[in-house]
Amino acid sequence: MSENAQPKPKLPAKQLAILGKNGHCNQITKNKNEFPENATHLEDTGQDDGGQSIEAQGDKQYSSAVARFAEPMAYTSVFPYLPEMIRDFGVEENMVAKWAGLTSSVFAVCQGIAAVPWGRAADRFGRKPILICGLLSTMICFIVWGMSTSLTMAITVRAILGAGNGNVGIIRTMVAEMVPEKELQARAFSIMPLVWSLGSVVGPAFGGFLAQPARQYPDLFGSIEYFKRFPYALPNLVATFFFLISATSAILFLKETLASKRERQDWGLLVGQRVSRAFTKSPRHGNRRPSFVDGEATAPLLPSELQSNKSTANLPAPGMKEVFTRQTVVNLVSYTFLALHSVAYDQNISVFLNYPVVKHTPDNTRLPFYFNGGFGLKPGKIGTIFTVYGITCGLIQFLLYAPLVNRYGVLRCYKVCSVVLPFVYLVTPYTSLLPTEATRVAAILAVMLVKAVSIIIAFPSITILLTNSCTSLRVLGTLNGFATSFSGFGRAVGPASTGIAFSWGADNGYIVSAYFYLGIVAALGTIPVFMIVEGDGPTASADNSDTEGDGSIEDSGAMMPNESAIDGGSDDEADASAPLLNKNHKNGTTYQAINGGHK
């Protein structure tokens, strides 16, 4: 450094460190007066510690949320009318629960089998194209599902529907790649469950009210032969409209998050940008200097990013030992149990609500276990109950989840919810003993709301815990594929076994059988929960270590030692630069891309 050089100013906590044009370490802060002359400015971009602008992260998550919305809406729209649909296929009353469960199980089994291949395809070809394929496949299958005329056809379509969509794991991976910072995970990972909750509001509402339109609304649809022949087609045709919105949004506005595919030309995004400009006014930048983040620029300032992306793309596929560590296995087992009993409950409760009311007498009722009967509700009322359930889930997700997790921690919240759920299941069948429909509906709503609170906290929590149990972004897509497979196994076994238990109980006067079974399964599921240790989350450090020997950092002209990141700063300031300078790496500080390529 020359003698005339100015002393470096003390830097605030919110700062980043990158390589300047001369190969030296330059500090970038949000205060434009503190920029070295050879550093690229980032003022006014809302830059977060992870290097991506908050606005850019928000846009990506918004696009992925819109792309995700149609799937939960279509999935939950089936619940209100599924029992009557199966009954219309000629299935006996006491066997409806069994076949409803098996129909859902086939979907989950095929989804689980296909999840890992879809995950590997997303790791190879990119997240976005595989996501769009899943949306279009699901849209076509739902159209055909609505025109099912036999139980065999319905089960076959559900099997194809499950195998044709691996978006659950892909979306989860995209969120993890968008937001690697642990302090932001609670909010980020709560977005998709919030989208699911919103879909759960809309789906059951139109599923219940639009099923059997010729019978429910004879003046409007009674003369249309199509709806007489296919009484469950209308809800699925409506769902098609939402799938088209989701697919179009994904094509035009969703950005690729896989680092090795970000430089690929995306014609959909180009069209989307033109569409956006047509409806938005150009912002006045004034004298604002260009930002590295603008347009998600590539790395003329940081050439090692492109080299890292290319070298990562050429690395061999990760081995199973990298995927299955002790903690990932424990998290996968816990996730499987949660998926098993939660989905089984949601599937079976619609059958319970539709099952005929039984007048209780001393001959057919001997508490606490021997009694029978359901609620005798029609699809419209069942849809209303599920809509209230979905609204509650959405409000909890939006208002309570992040504050609760930030205050008490992800793992503690997950443990509490896991303990509460068995009691929810055990109480459920006793709501049918109440004397009037109003009291029964009020009671089941109260029980379902407690379940909503527990499950809407539990699912994003285990997702965060599973993500943080992974040590490398290289295996995150594969791990989420296996997570979908494991949960698919649970979603298959749960509804099928619960449906069989419900049918046996209905035949023998023990309507409690299905819910006691779920209570026992949920209680067993708490065992792995208390074996979970919260990890630090996946980073690119392990990935970069594979390429450091190739000079990905040295070729830039300088190494970045720990002390060069923060000159004269406090420990808090050092922590603020962690997304760029990962101090947890065992070999010292490693560079991480500003635009979120390797985190």
Image (tube, rainbow, N blue to C red):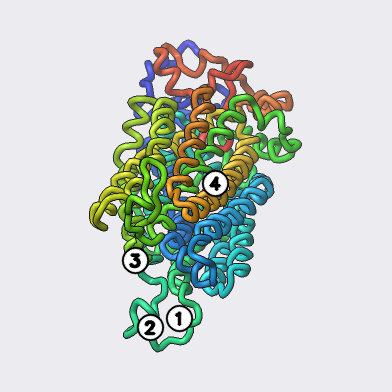
The Cα–Cα distance between marks 1 and 4, rounded to whole angstroms, is 33 Å
- Which comes sooner in the sequence, label 2 or label 4? 2
Q: In this view, does 292 lie above or below 564?
A: below
Check disc 4: other Cα within 10 Å, few if <14, some if 14-19, many if 20+: many
Task: Nearest to the eye among marks 3 and 2: give it.
Answer: 3
Q: Is residue 547 left or right of residue 392?
A: right
Where does the C terminus fall, quadrant-wise? top right
Nearer to us in this view, 388 or 562 = 388
Q: Name the residue under label 4.
A: 494
Residue 345 marker = none
Q: Name the residue under label 3.
A: 380
- Which comes sooner in the sequence, label 3 or label 4? 3
Please report the residue visible at 60 percent of the width from the left and 63 percent of the height from the top: 155
Check disc 3: other Cα within 10 Å, few if <14, some if 14-19, many if 20+: many
Q: What's the amino acid at mark 3?
A: Gly
Q: What's the amino acid at mark 1?
A: Phe
Look at the numbered discs 3 and 4 and tell me whether their residues touch, using CB distance below 8 Å: no
Residue 296, position in %: x, y?
A: 51, 44
Task: Nearest to the eye among marks 3 and 1: give it.
Answer: 3
- Which comes sooner in the sequence, label 1 or label 4? 1
- Which comes sooner in the sequence, label 3 or label 2? 2
Q: Is residue 585 above or below residue 91?
A: above
Nearer to us in this view, 406 or 251 = 406
Look at the numbered discs 1 and 2 and tell me whether their residues touch, using CB distance below 8 Å: yes
Residue 227 marker = 1
Task: Nearest to the eye among marks 2 and 4: give it.
Answer: 4
The kind of secondary structure element at disc 4 is helix
Q: What's the amino acid at mark 4?
A: Gly
The Cα–Cα distance between marks 3 and 2, rounded to whole angstroms, is 17 Å
